[in-house]
Image: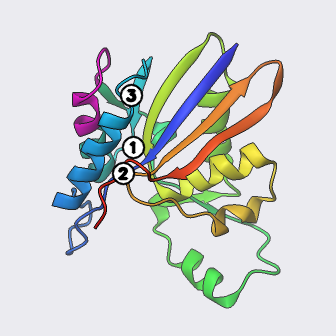
Amino acid sequence: MESTLYLVRHGQADETGDADPGLTERGRAEAHAIGLRLQSVRFDAILHSSRRRARETAVIVARSLSGCEPEHSQHADDRTPIPTDVSGMSANLLAFLDAVPADERDVDGRSLDGSIAALGRGVGSDRQLLVVTHNFVIGWFVRDALGAPSAAWTRLNSANGALTIVRYRTDEPTRLIAFNDTGHLPRP
């Protein structure tokens, strides 16, 4: 059995003060571009986080696809893995982690590990899922796919509207097919 996750970072958000910002014009263009890029893929589901920028991205992408309506999944929600062992982390990274809002804090990435189990490793049948999510979530999935140490997610950055593909099979190791692919995006 095989589960392929198409992880998309939401389009550029309007960061002018709203606690849950929507997309900018550029973010909408990025979402449209990823929709066009993925037109030939048949998805079993389009999942998105509860954040407005991810929901709006998923709705725009879905207009270019057939067969699925976007739906919220807790497994796509915005999470930041907060390590219990912070030895060896820089002062800048520690300050950043201390400032993470309570509703995004994920101690040792346990919630994200559950998302990997549910979306990737919990393969009961062949499926392809489009998951519109956030930078740190994608970083955690990639870190896991590579078998990298837990802190490796801090060195992975996905551009807005970028595509990452991870394939899970019951009979072989997880494969990272693509990371931070931006070839479809309009140039600034």
Q: Nearer the viewer, residue 20 or 135?
A: 135
Q: Eyeballing the image, is 12 above or below 173?
A: below
User: At numbered mark 2, what does the secondary structure look like: helix, strand or loop?
Assistant: loop
Q: Which residue is mark 1?
A: 49
Q: Nearer the viewer, mark 1 or mark 3?
A: 3
Give the class, few, some or many, for how many residues have Cα within 10 Å of label 1's Cα (few <14, many ≥20): many
Going from N to C along the chain, the mark reached first, 2 or 3, is 2
Q: Residue furthest bottom?
A: 91
Q: Residue at x 66, y 69 (%)?
A: 155
Left or right? Give the position of 156 relative to 65. Answer: right
User: At numbered mark 1, what does the secondary structure look like: helix, strand or loop?
Assistant: loop
Question: Which numbered disc covers residue 10?
Answer: 2
Q: Residue at x 65, y 12 (%)?
A: 124
Q: Residue furthest left?
A: 25
Quarter where residue 92 is shown = bottom right
Amino acid type at image mark 1? Ser
Inspect the magenta stretch and tell me whether residue 63 lies in it: yes
Which residues are the magenta region? 59-69
